[in-house]
Amino acid sequence: AQSVTQPDIHITVSEGASLELRCNYSYGATPYLFWYVQSPGQGLQLLLKYFSGDTLVQGIKGFEAEFKRSQSSFNLRKPSVHWSDAAEYFCAVGGNRDDKIIFGKGTRLHILP
Amino acid sequence: NAGVTQTPKFQVLKTGQSMTLQCAQDMNHNSMYWYRQDPGMGLRLIYYSASEGTTDKGEVPNGYNVSRLNKREFSLRLESAAPSQTSVYFCASSGIGQGSSYEQYFGPGTRLTVT
């Protein structure tokens, strides 16, 4: 069955510290992978996506993610977080023959001043 | 471009009342989607439409109906609202099948409360 797991419901980091948000997926075909961010009261905004090619992808706002097929993971990273990064982050997976994508339950990021 | 727009932004209904949530996109996308978001549950797909004239059930379709009015518009109807339908509803669209980007673009959401 297709699924996305985000093991951490909440993560708290200090401003300026590095960040890694975990995402594991289960998908029977070649996966297309996404990270979205949702600020309070807002819709979802795409941070980055992986379709093929280089397994390290760069996104907006200084985020990057690495696709590791052997680990079925697509973890999101940022070297130095800012207070404005406090939000909820969703990992999602889809396929090239499917017009739906499956979302994880999200990780809420809190930033300490 | 406005992207994906949704109306209304907020709505309060009494149990048993009906209403329609409107969604429109101006990106010439084929596919459109309705999700609901509840705390701790992530986004769950209610219905989607892969092209004008087609609709399919998602993960949680019970209690809802949809209409793909034309390529731009995709509405979600609650015929008899229940408190369990209290949620935030998001519409999204994607350009799959057009050789364009695959990701979904989201509207700002409708916060619905059923009392």
Image (cartoon, coloured by chain):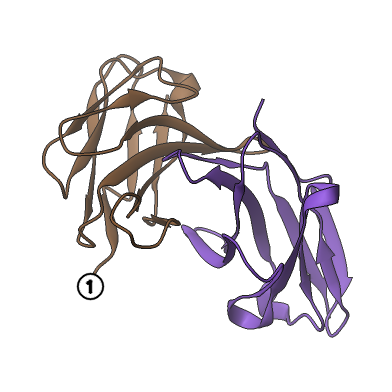
Q: Which residue is mark 1?
A: B1
Q: What residue is shown at x 32% (from left), y 40% (from top)?
A: B11
> Is residue A8 among the parts visible in the rendering?
no
Q: What residue is shown at x 47% (from left), y 33% (from top)?
A: B45
Chain B rendering hue: brown
Question: As rendered, which of A74 and A88 lies closer to the eye?
Answer: A74
Question: As rendered, which of B11 and A39 lies closer to the eye?
Answer: A39
Classify the position of the N terminus of chain B by image quarter: bottom left
**Image coords of residue A7 (percent x, y):** 83, 44
Q: What residue is shown at x 73% (from left), y 82% (from top)?
A: A82
Chain A rendering hue: purple
**Image coords of residue B108 (percent x, y):** 39, 57
**Does A56 sit above or below residue B60?**
below
Q: Report which quarter residue A89 is drawn in.
A: bottom right
**Image coords of residue A86 (percent x, y):** 70, 69
**Image coords of residue A99 (percent x, y):** 41, 40
Left or right, B31 with respect to B35, comes to left
